[in-house]
Amino acid sequence: MGRIRNALVRPWVVGVLALAVAGGGFGLYWFRPWKLWQDETVQEALPGATAASEAPAGAPSGTPSGAPSDASPAPSPAGPATLASGELISHEHATSGTVKLVRLTDGSHVVRLENLDTSNGPDLHVWLTDAPVKEGQAGWHVFDDGDHVSLGKLKGNKGSQNYTVPAGVDPSGFTSVSIWCDRFDVSFGAAELARA
């Protein structure tokens, strides 16, 4: 009798253990909890930004000999222009930094994250949205309700980074930026864009 009971129990125990291992593996893949302890820092310069050039020491000032005195120096090309900016606030995870919508000299646009500091997580993206930025839990899930454009995966959870606004997208129709977790449909943090 005991042998029959043991023979029936073993397959059941093996089945439960197999389900537990499969469920644990799926949970680790889905949640990726180790990312909470892994920081990825990315430091990018703003495209087209150059330091102001200075004349070398000892260079002559004024008009070079032989040049007409009414000639004005060639205008330097205009650099990138900040059209809107805002400060990131925390949602699902503590998040800070500055967001800028920048028009580059070639007329294209980038969203620039400066001094970003947030948690790492699975499937994080940078979204340009038309949703209002709300503090607390009320703001965690609003960014997929209206229009939004994904600018790509978050390059790093720390640092300063650039995200290209796709050609054909008019950034003037968007009012906020969210660090969006696509896996769980939640905002890690967001910033309202105030026009410059």
Image (spheres, grey):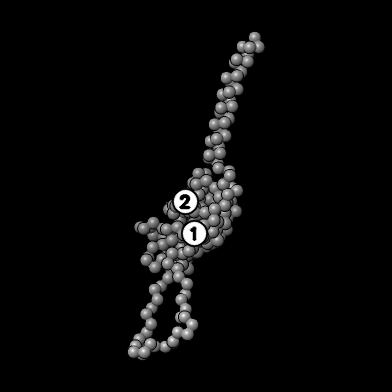
For badge 2, the amino acid type reads Lys
Q: What number is the disc on residue 153?
A: 2
Q: Which residue is drawn at 46% across and 64% down?
A: 46
- Disc 2, SS: strand
How far from the left and from the top, in percent, is residue 118? 57, 54
- Quick one: quadrant of the N terminus? top right
Q: Which of 43 and 80 is in front in this view?
A: 43
For badge 1, the amino acid type reads Gln
Q: Residue at x 35, y 86 (%)?
A: 71
**23, above or below 62, in the image:** above
**165, above or below 2, in the image:** below
How far from the left and from the top, in percent, is residue 137? 58, 50
**Residue 27 quadrant:** top right
**22, above or below 165, in the image:** above
Q: Nearer the viewer, residue 62 or 8?
A: 62
The residue to which callout 1 is attached is 161
Residue 169 seen by the camera? yes
Q: Which residue is drawn at 58% across and 44% down?
A: 34
Residue 139 seen by the camera? no
Structural distance between the alpha carbons of marks 1 and 2: 11 Å
How far from the left and from the top, in percent, is residue 64? 38, 87
- Left or right of 146? Residue 26 is right
